[in-house]
Amino acid sequence: MNFETALAKPLPFDNLLTPLIEAGYNSTLLWQAGVLAACALAAWGAMRLIHPYLDKTGALWTAGRGGMHRVGVPLLMLLALLLGRDLAGVWLANTHLLNLAVPLLLSLVGVRLAIYSLRYVFEPRESLKVWERSAAWLIWGAFALHITGLLPRIHAAMEALSFQSGSHRFSLWLLLQAAAVIVVAIIAALMLGRLVERRLMGVTQLNLSLRMALSKAVRTVFLILAVLVALPAVGIDLTVLSVFGGALGVGIGFGLQKVASNYVSGFIILLDRSVRIGDMVTVDNKYGEVSQINTRYTLLKAFDGTESIVPNETLITQTVVNHSLTRPNVRISLPVQVSYDADLERAEALMLEAARSQQRVILDDPDSLPRVFLKEFADNGVLLELAVWIRDAGEGQNNLRSDINWAIWRGFKAAGIEIPFPQRVVHFAPSSGPISIDS
């Protein structure tokens, strides 16, 4: 069927507004309004009964509470209206108002459900509002086309725009329908993945990295299943995608190998738990806390507020210094130089006292107690080093260094211990007499 033939074929023009306007003001219209009011009252009452179960704390089933709060009343009213319209059709001559209310409520449920799904799956951001508005306009536009009777004509025109690929016929309507089904399936898969992720994150008996790896794997499986189920649902044979799959495999083998490598490396990191969220690591001359382990990259947050995006492949192929892999204790060294005339035992006591005055310094572990080392006899004085251990490296080191240095400075000043500065002794050779220059 070509495009001209499809448009020339007469189509029924089912306008829901015209019969309602022609009916005018009569008792039938009042009866339909009464049915609408009864359905709305029944939906409101049913929602009041359901609310205590939705808001009950500690319930085993907690998924979809927000969605039920959003679509509960219009959905229950729609179900009641479908039943009420069938019953009203027994004694009423027409149900034009009820016929118009059904797609209206259906569109309202679709808009609220679409917005809730997008907000449940994606993080709140400015671009999300654009998608929400687009979904709302698409649903309300389809409703407007339906009640005006234009939707069958647009469907026929889109069905006429088609092309043949082997034994398969693809039309614009089929492609649009496939895109819509795939989008809905992907959003449903992401919602199920988010639900499983929340349930897994609540299982504190499992390691955090293992929970994240399982949640990402489940989300990937759901996405693949969504596409495999959505395409046959709209009549697209999966064998048609064999050529595309082969091209995609070649693309991954050449152009996308880094992306695939980072993706696989992310799962390896989560499974072998060599790098975990909250660890203090040094990789590629960058030191910070691992704040996120994503599919493609790991986010490293430094103490100055900067965040480094490290590809997961880097954490696999390069040497990573994990300061808190087996134990959270981290050693901090503070070099201090005193003059040769200073009392070294007194200086050692003051440095240990400054270390013990800090709450973050470990004092309950015999292997991690503060110690003072005599490093070397330098040119300008004796170099001492104070070594302390802490368990909360994520709180930063510079602030603790500053507090201990301030305490050492005050203690040395009160005790009269001198911190030397570089000195140079210059000797002048005796003069051997005036120098004469003959010209």
Image (cartoon, grey):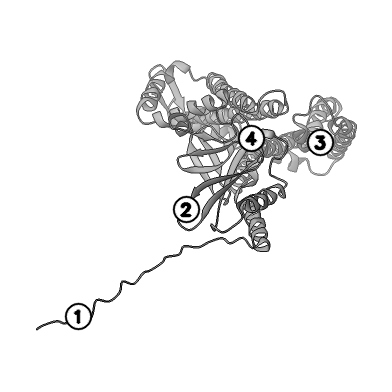
State the residue in front, 191 or 288: 288
Q: CA distance from mark 1 to mark 2?
A: 40 Å
- The residue under label 3 is 73
Q: Secondary structure at mark 1?
A: loop
- The residue under label 1 is 435
Could you say which quadrant of the image residue 117 lies in? top right
The amino acid type of the residue labelled 2 equals Ala
Task: Please determine whether, in this image, residue 342 is positioned above or below residue 356.
Answer: below
Point out residue 190 in the picture as x, y percentages from the top left corner: 62, 29
Q: CA distance from mark 4 to mark 1?
A: 71 Å
- Please report the residue visible at 38 percent of the width from the left and 18 percent of the height from the top: 166
Label located before the other in sequence (4 or 1): 4
State the residue in front, 435 or 112: 435
Label located before the other in sequence (2 or 3): 3
The amino acid type of the residue labelled 4 equals Pro
Confirm whether residue 182 shows in the render.
yes
Q: CA distance from mark 3 to mark 1?
A: 111 Å
Q: CA distance from mark 2 to mark 3?
A: 81 Å
Give neighbour class at mark 1: few <14, some 14-19, many 20+ (Cα, 10 Å): few
Point out residue 229 in the picture as x, y percentages from the top left corner: 56, 19
- Please report the residue visible at 81 percent of the width from the left and 36 percent of the height from the top: 73
- The residue under label 4 is 328
